[in-house]
Amino acid sequence: MNSGVAAAFDYAVEYPSGKRELHGNGSPAFTISVENPAQLDRVLTGEGYAAALGFIHHDFDVSGDLVAALHLRQLLSRPLWRDRLLNLVSRLAPSRLETWFQGRNRAARNIRFHYDVPTPFYQAFLDSRMVYSAADFADSRWSLDEAQESKLKGICEDLELQPGERFLDIGSGWGALLLYAAENYKVHAAGCTLSRNQFEFARSLAHARGLGDAVTIREADYRDLSGRFDKISSIGMFEHVGRHRLHSYFRKVESLLTRGGLFFNSGIVRPQNISDDAQTWFILKRVFPGGELAHLSEVIRAAESAGLEILRIKTLRKDYARTCREWVERLRRNERLCIDLAGEETYRTWLLYLAGSSANFDNNTTTVYSVLMRKP
């Protein structure tokens, strides 16, 4: 290990014999438990997809700060022919045809793969409102619940919601934004999701809070929506759309907006110099089938070509890194419950995915932007 890496990461390695090695000069941030030095080398420097599978299958373990461990691996990993092959596969695989064509049945299957894990599994690591996107830690002392409420309030204020307006949330998840807007801004809120679990949870919650007349939720594809809305939001949804379908996505949104209506679109994107790689392949196979990250420039071009005016662009990249880290810590605190609910492999897959996401937001290999737009 070079001295720069050693200075940045203090960690320990444990073997079945009880032998423990300390790397660095301070208290270890994490401990890697492996069978032998050869496995340690594969974990830290070997092919990424194999290392990920090894973690979720519990061939080795990492206790302590998993995000820091992934940062270390990113610094130490060396390009291998298998990595280069998987980079190519992730770009040319038949599943990538979805970036051009995606039927409604396939879109629904993809969404349900990720979101129809038992709802209590998500409740074990999300905030009390079940917001599954970047929190806004405008005050670093805030809890996750406070930061997520701040984010919801900020969206409603950016959209200038007024009592009686028709508000649509595309990909409305477990209903957090819909319910917040209906309760606090007295709008007529409508939402759609392709997840049966999310649909049933959000609908039940709306009725339990006495919002059945103010909140309407459909289990539907956004492409099948009709009507006109004064304000529209889409939070963490368009990552499922695909880069080459962005034009039709924004045209659909434009058709649903009244003249002068505002649209708040927020989602994860990639910097211009980052493309699909072995990590992408892991996410496509194990976490988000059909997902694809666009570049901000593609988002802006597609929105403007659909006739939408760009009013403001904001990033919550550092906030998303902290949000994912908070989710990882909550998953770990509720490990036994999560394994009982979804199985150990799903638990470790989500743990690795969220820790990797935090590391990627930290180092700007992924970022997140909210773009406020208007239909002239």
Image (cartoon, helix red, strand yellow):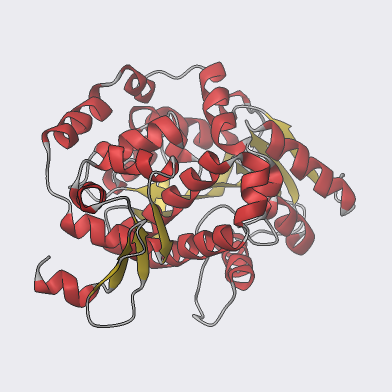
Give how far across and how far down residue 115 sits, in percent.
60, 38
Q: Residue at x 66, y 36 (%)?
A: 192
Q: Residue 85 versus residue 339: which sits nearer the camera? A: 339
Q: Residue at x 41, y 56 (%)?
A: 355
Does residue 91 show up? yes
Looking at the image, the residue that sits furthest to the front is: 17
Q: Residue at x 33, y 23 (%)?
A: 96
Give how far across and how far down residue 65 sits, in percent.
40, 66
Q: Is 3 left, or right, of 134 in this rendering?
A: left
Q: Is 366 left, or right, of 221 in this rendering?
A: left
Q: Residue 106 versus residue 349: which sits nearer the camera? A: 349
Does residue 361 show up? no
Give how far across and how far down residue 126 sits, in percent.
62, 57
Corner quadrant of residue 73 = bottom left
Corner quadrant of residue 289 = top left
- Quarter of the image with the N terminus is bottom left
Q: How many marks?
A: 0
Q: Residue 30 versus residue 183: which sits nearer the camera? A: 30
Q: Residue 371 versus residue 217: which sits nearer the camera? A: 217
Q: Is 196 left, or right, of 363 in this rendering?
A: right
Q: Residue at x 18, y 50 (%)?
A: 45
Give how far across and how far down residue 226 sits, in percent.
65, 28
Where 168 falls versus 183 (above or below)?
A: above
